[in-house]
Amino acid sequence: MTSTSDTRTAPAAAGTAAPAAPAMTHRQVLESLSGILLGMFVSVLATSVVSSSLPRIITDLQGSQSAFTWVVTATLLTTTVSTPIWGKLADLVDRKTLIQVALVISVVSSALAGLSQSTGQLIGMRALQGLGAGGLTALGTVLIADIISPRERGRYMGLMGAVMAVAMVGGPLLGGVLTDGPGWRWNFFVGLPLAVAAIVVLQRTLHLPRPERRRVRIDYLGALLISVGVAGLLLWVTFAGDRFDWVSGASAAMLLGSLVVLVLAVLVERRAAEPVIPLTLFRNRTLVLAVVGSIAVGVSMFGTSVFLSQYMQLARGQSPTMSGVMTIPMIAGLFLASTLVGQVISRTGRYKRFMVLGGVLQVVGLALMGTIHYDTDFWLVGLYMAVLGAGVGMLMQNLVLAAQNTLDLREMGTGSALIAFFRTLGGAIGVSALGAVLAARVQDSIVSGLVAQGVDPSALGSGGTSALPDLATLPAPLRLVVEQAFGDGVADLFLVATPIALVTLVAVLLLEEVPLQRRSGLEMRAAEAGAGTTAGEPTGTLAEEEAREERAATAGGTGAPAGGPGTTRG
């Protein structure tokens, strides 16, 4: 196993034995990228299309706030636990086949979710859907690293940002229109033809060399222990304060049990021949800081999208369609920031300054969102959302970029998946914990508001204060109480998330900027094969490789660094 220390390994071997493979043309990159982006579009759409419809879905299925949270948490849970497994498989077997398998899982689970007759069935199918999403999340970034070099990736940030923006903006809009029209079940059916199209396009456009023949050894025990330990933590965060008190025997048993399982997982990973999460990765300082930073980004991304729909519909009385429209400022901020910053990074090779700015904007955006109420002007809420979106846009892809730039080629899949794992884990824990906080605060606010008006809390219906109410059926006084409760409750969640964003800012400030490589994963793999580097052999640090290239160029009197003309020196 190659050690990924803080020496910022450069995956390619020194290049005197054979020249690097020629770079793909712009057209070839776009053709290969089309299938990858379509697969990522399907993954994002599957999540975003239901975000504006969840209040209606849970109401129709007679679910509670807990069910609302679990429809989202179930997907994030299985996405989280499966992402490192998909990432490890990406380093062992054919990546093209893997992403097509992930798409098939997404197709089947989405169709079954649309046929659900209860919140329990819906949660189960959404959990299955998360397995496919984990594969698409892990494999998408790895395949992009295969065909596009870190330095040139900014040129294509516009395309990637556009696809993500269309999926994130169009999803809630489309979901709202379908919910107000033929019904919310069509939210789960609408993505099926797109997933099938993605499978076909990937088959026709993505051309990768055959993976090196090697014995594949899957660390099943490690995967099981990691899954059980992470799932236990998420369940503890979700149930504590609802099913049992935070300080109780049940809470202590669940927390300590999960931690024991995770400790066992670490022991197993230390001895495994092909660990799911190689512990040597944590010697890479850049990767560790990127992981820490990604946790708060996950909370901002998933928490905002989930609870903003409740704010728009239950605090502002908007329809599912309009609640989707109201998210446009945040997605516009994310899209513009990621696109413009990506272009500048591609031209200059400098990325840290933009990540620091993104960290500041994320903190400011969350703090501003914490000031909203049920009657705050929409233009002001939109402005706050745009600030938050710009911060996330400057951080999300660039955290992955900074880490991938320092990873060994044979650990690119595992390392990239590790960042996605912790980003999704942050989102899952955030949604679970914030959902529990929201449920408790809203219930207390509604009860106190109704009692102040001399109204029995059971007037809200058979579910009392724990069920999500239908505002259209409530008389004006009761409706105002509910709107105030959800308006203030959602705002409190953003304030809770603000300190977490400060951790991301600190992590970004501690990052050491490393010059971006100019070769894609395929080019480095070809150069490595030409140089005769054996699988698993350490390829040296970036500084060592550049020194070798300089010596070769001096001895031969010709030649340029493998990175090509204009390679940035560190």
Image (cartoon, rainbow, N blue to C red):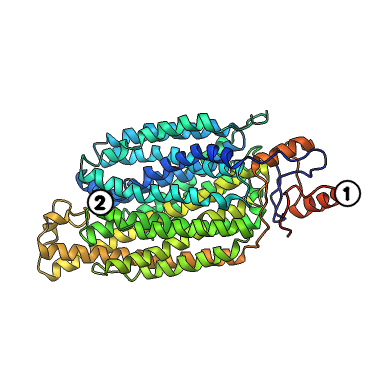
Residue found at the very far right of the displayed protein: 555
Image marks 2 and 1: residues in contact by CB distance under 8 Å: no
- From the image, state whether disc 2 or disc 1 is nearer to you: 1
Above or below residue 80? Residue 375 is: below
- The residue under the point 21% across, 39% down is 182
Instruction: Point out the image quarter for the C terminus.
Output: bottom right
The mark total stands at: 2
Q: Which residue is mark 2?
A: 321
Could you tell me residue 399's position as x and y percent? 56, 56
* 278 or 98: nearer the viewer: 98
Above or below residue 285? Residue 123 is: above
Q: Earlier in the sequence, mark 2 or mark 1?
A: 2
Q: Secondary structure at mark 2?
A: helix
Q: Is residue 528 left or right of residue 17?
A: left
Q: Residues within 10 Å of mark 2 (few under 14, many from 20)?
A: many
- The residue under the point 74% across, 53% down is 542
Q: Which mark is residue 495?
A: none
Q: Residues within 10 Å of mark 1 (few under 14, many from 20)?
A: few
User: Is residue 245 visible in this depiction of the protein?
Assistant: no
- The residue under the point 29% across, 45% down is 175
Give how far apart the Cα atoms at labels 2 and 1 are.
Answer: 66 Å
Q: Which residue is mark 1?
A: 557
* 478 or 564: nearer the viewer: 564
Above or below residue 189? Residue 45 is: below
- The amino acid at mark 1 is Gly
Could you tell me residue 110's position as x and y percent? 35, 36
Could you tell me residue 338's position as x and y percent? 49, 57
- The residue under the point 65% across, 62% down is 512
Q: Secondary structure at mark 1?
A: loop
- The amino acid at mark 2 is Thr
